[in-house]
Image: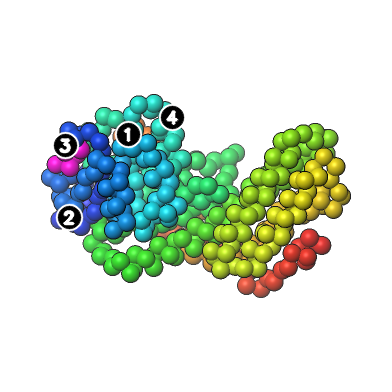
């Protein structure tokens, strides 16, 4: 793969953290990366040292071996969940071995940008870094995931999940743009607002799915334990949506979610013989949530981009072909005018 896009003189600004327990592999990769101009490559053989480094300063790239520590996958989840470090959008490459298929799945679910199967040659690692610098996959957000969109949208398999272009300090530095810590914090805050708002979208999709399962079970008189379990899932989703709304500074929506969660909780206690009012609440719940959520739509930036403009990376294990950068993002047209809406829980459930 051609590396001419990535000027070698600019590679010295890239901060790379490499976590690998095998000394020979670790030193070989560090020597290769530094030899290619990535002078700010730090290596770690203990998880505690890597975590300490994250608390000091975020890297642009994390290269992590799955066997560095049993918590390697959880560490990536903590980075993506903004529980570790100051930038949840760093490029993460996981090197996996052992139970390869299982660990590939774990790495993908944790939110890694790229997964490489051991043994990884230094040249392959360099190719992947350069490729993802300029061809990063947009991110999606669900109730329990933040990371690259890997699902391929087709005419018979459409996706309603918003796709976001997130902070990419690696590309900024590769193109000669220097970002101060204050500017990085502002960019991360802006993207996290988009993430939280997109998570509300995901809550709405999940609410609709679970409500349909429950109502179908009642209609078919299959009132079994899974109905009770799904009602409790509904409570959990609503509570999480309420917490997300609070983070977004939407107290009214948070109160609505809390109120709906309590009503569903009461329904769960009497799920074998539910009152008509409880079933009516279920039928209206998704619509109520969607109406209330419109008041947060104005918070979306122009980061959301149409699915048909997404450039996907090659499958895991396949060579990365040269590719042009994705086209500029276009504003997402949601049609919502949330600022004009004022809704109370009573209004919603009477609608």
Distance Cα–Cα, label 3 vs label 4: 27 Å
Figure colour scheme: rainbow
Q: Residue at x 38, y 28 (%)?
A: 100
| Pointer 4 with pointer 1, Cβ within 8 A | no
- Taking the image as shown, residue 86 lies to the left or right of residue 234, namely left
Report the mark closest to the observer, 3 or 2: 3
Residue occupied by mark 1: 67
Badge 4 or badge 1: first in the primary sequence: 1
Badge 3 or badge 1: first in the primary sequence: 3
Residues in magenta, as a range: 26-32
State the image coordinates of residue 175 (x, y, percent, origin top left): 25, 59
Q: Quadrant of residue 262?
A: bottom right
Q: Label 1: few (<14), some or many (≥20) within 10 Å?
A: some
Badge 3 or badge 4: first in the primary sequence: 3
In what quadrant of the picture does the C terminus appear?
bottom right
| Pointer 2 with pointer 1, Cβ within 8 A | no
Mark 1 element type:
loop
Badge 4 or badge 2: first in the primary sequence: 2
Residue occupied by mark 2: 12
Type of secondary structure dominating the magenta stretch: helix
Q: Label 2: few (<14), some or many (≥20) within 10 Å?
A: some
Mark 4 element type:
helix
Q: Is residue 140 magenta?
A: no
Distance Cα–Cα, label 3 vs label 2: 18 Å
Distance Cα–Cα, label 2 vs label 1: 28 Å
Q: Which mark is residue 102?
A: 4
Q: Which mark is residue 28?
A: 3
| Pointer 3 with pointer 1, Cβ within 8 A | no
């Amino acid at each position: 793969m051609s590396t001419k896009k990535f000027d070698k003189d600019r590679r010295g600004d890239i901060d790379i953290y490499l976590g690998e327990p095998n000394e020979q592999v670790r030193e070989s990769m560090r020597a290769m990366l530094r030899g290619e101009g990535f002078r700010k490559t730090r290596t770690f053989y203990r998880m505690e040292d890597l975590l300490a480094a994250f608390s000091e300063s975020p890297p642009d790239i994390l290269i992590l071996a799955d066997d560095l520590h049993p918590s390697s996958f959880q560490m990536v989840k903590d980075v993506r969940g903004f529980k570790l470090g100051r930038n949840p959008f760093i490029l993460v490459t996981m090197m996996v071995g052992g139970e390869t298929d299982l660990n590939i799945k774990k790495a993908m679910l944790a939110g890694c940008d790229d997964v490489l199967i051991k043994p990884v040659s230094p040249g392959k690692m360099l190719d992947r870094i350069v490729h993802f610098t300029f061809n990063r996959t947009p991110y999606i957000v669900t109730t329990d995931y933040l990371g690259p969109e890997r699902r391929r949208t087709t005419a018979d398999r459409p996706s309603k999940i918003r796709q976001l272009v997130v902070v990419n300090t690696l590309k900024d530095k590769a193109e000669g743009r220097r970002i101060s810590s204050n500017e990085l914090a502002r960019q991360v805050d802006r993207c996290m607002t988009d993430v939280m708002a997109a998570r509300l979208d995901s809550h709405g999709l999940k609410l609709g799915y679970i409500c349909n399962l429950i109502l179908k079970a009642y209609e078919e008189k299959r009132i079994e334990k899974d109905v009770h379990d799904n009602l409790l899932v509904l409570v959990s989703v609503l509570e999480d949506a309420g917490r997300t709304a609070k983070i977004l500074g939407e107290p009214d929506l948070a109160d609505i979610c809390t109120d709906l969660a309590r009503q569903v909780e009461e329904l769960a206690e009497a799920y074998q013989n539910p009152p008509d009012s409880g079933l009516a609440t279920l039928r209206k719940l998704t619509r109520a949530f969607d109406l209330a959520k419109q008041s947060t739509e104005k918070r979306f930036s122009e980061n959301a981009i149409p699915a048909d403009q997404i450039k996907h990376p090659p499958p895991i294990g396949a060579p990365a072909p040269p590719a042009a950068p994705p086209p500029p993002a276009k504003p997402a047209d949601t049609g919502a005018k949330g600022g004009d809406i004022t809704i109370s829980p009573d209004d919603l459930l009477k609608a």
